[in-house]
Image (cartoon, rainbow, N blue to C red):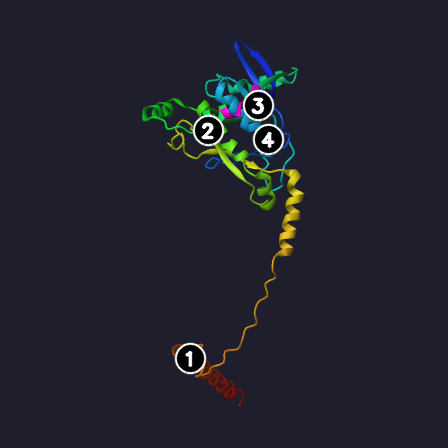
């Protein structure tokens, strides 16, 4: 199975980069939650596959840049934050300088894209991306070597990690895509399904390790299913049983009532006697005032 991307090969000075643009991202939206909770991409199944194949490409080629021109996409829901940005995923070995991005983007507008085909062998990639136990020294070596970054510049959010991070990202998104996301969305539109798929480490960021959950997640939201979700909510509301509050019965004190213990009857009688005594005192006081 071949996955197609638009391809731009650009030379700027001595630098040369290949920029890929995925297909099917018309409904994809970028949303930032906050520095302590990470960020998220929101979209339908086509957008989910685009992000998943992006991770697959960067597993094997750490020098490519994958560009999501989504800042002008329509907002999916009024409750979502309005954070209109493009997104670029790449690896920390791509030798890409963020300061040059504005020039790259300008050059792309004057170019006709070529077609790039990624040979997607699911069985092979699933096996390669499956979690493996790393030896301690390999883990520490990677932890020291990985210096990923994220930057916000030129209305674009840049994310750079290593190939192993994208391997984990592909694995998580593949499991997520295999679920019945459409059914889950229709049944619970207010809390759509989502999945964390990338974690990153910044130099000196709270002294957290590479696997800490400062993360990126994908939330499934399909605008084409919103009407069906509303219909499901209305049908569920109509089928719900109507709760009627039972009438409050007046307490009847009876020494022969076997449904109450002697202690309950004694306490009830004491409370009733106290209220009667208090009421009589109030009546006497009112009579004295009127007299």
Callout 2 secondary element: helix
Q: How many marks?
A: 4
Q: Residue at x 58, y 13 (%)?
A: 10
Q: Quadrant of residue 87?
A: top right
> To which residue does mark 3 refer?
67
First-in-chain label (3 vs 4): 4
Give the left or right position of residue 266, taking residue 239 as reference.
left
Give the left or right position of residue 143, taking residue 112 as reference.
left
> To which residue does mark 1 refer?
265
Whole-angstrom CA distance, mark 1 to mark 4, is 68 Å
Asked whether the beta carbons under mark 3 and mark 1 sit within 8 Å of each other, the answer is no
Nearer mark to the viewer, of 3 and 4:
4
From this viewpoint, is residue 245 visible? yes
Based on the picture, tell me whether residue 238 belongs to the magenta stretch: no
> To which residue does mark 2 refer?
168
First-in-chain label (2 vs 4): 4
Crowd around label 3: few <14 · some 14–19 · many ≥20 (10 Å)? many
Asked whether the beta carbons under mark 1 and mark 2 sit within 8 Å of each other, the answer is no
Quadrant where the N terminus is found in the figure: top right
Residue stretch rendered in magenta on the structure: 118-123
Callout 4 secondary element: helix
Q: Residue at x 42, y 79 (%)?
A: 265
From this viewpoint, is residue 162 visible? no
First-in-chain label (1 vs 4): 4
Whole-angstrom CA distance, mark 1 to mark 2, is 67 Å
Callout 3 secondary element: strand
> To which residue does mark 4 refer?
47
Location of residue 246 with respect to 196 vertically, above or below: below
Crowd around label 1: few <14 · some 14–19 · many ≥20 (10 Å)? some
Q: Residue furthest left?
A: 137
Q: Residue at x 38, y 77 (%)?
A: 263
Q: Where residue 118 sits in the image (x, y, percent)?
A: 56, 19
């Amino acid at each position: 199975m071949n996955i197609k991307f638009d391809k731009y090969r650009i030379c700027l000075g001595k630098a040369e980069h290949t920029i890929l643009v995925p297909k099917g991202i018309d409904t994809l939206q970028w949303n930032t939650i906050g520095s302590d909770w990470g960020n998220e991409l929101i979209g339908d199944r086509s957008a989910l596959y685009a992000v998943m194949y992006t991770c697959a490409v960067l597993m094997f080629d750490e020098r490519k840049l994958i560009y999501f021109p989504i800042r002008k996409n329509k907002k999916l829901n009024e409750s979502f934050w309005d954070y209109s940005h493009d997104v670029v995923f790449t690896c920390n070995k791509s030798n890409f300088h963020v300061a040059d991005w504005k020039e790259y983007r300008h050059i792309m507008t004057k170019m006709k894209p070529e077609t790039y085909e990624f040979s997607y062998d699911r069985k092979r990639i699933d096996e390669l991306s499956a979690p493996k136990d790393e030896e301690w020294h390999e883990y520490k070596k990677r932890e020291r070597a990985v210096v990923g970054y994220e930057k916000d510049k030129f209305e674009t959010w840049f994310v750079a990690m290593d190939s192993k991070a994208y391997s984990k990202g592909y694995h998580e998104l593949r499991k997520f895509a295999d679920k019945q996301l459409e059914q889950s969305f229709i049944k619970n539109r207010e809390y759509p399904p989502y999945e964390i798929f990338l974690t990153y480490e910044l130099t000196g960021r709270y002294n957290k390790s590479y696997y800490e959950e400062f993360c990126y997640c994908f939330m499934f939201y399909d605008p084409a299913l919103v009407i069906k979700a509303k219909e499901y909510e209305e049908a569920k509301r109509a089928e719900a049983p109507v709760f009627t509050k039972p009438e409050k019965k007046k307490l009847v004190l009876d020494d022969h009532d076997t449904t109450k213990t002697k202690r309950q009857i004694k306490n009830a009688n004491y409370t009733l006697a106290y209220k009667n005594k208090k009421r009589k005192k109030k009546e006497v006081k009112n009579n004295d005032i009127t007299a």
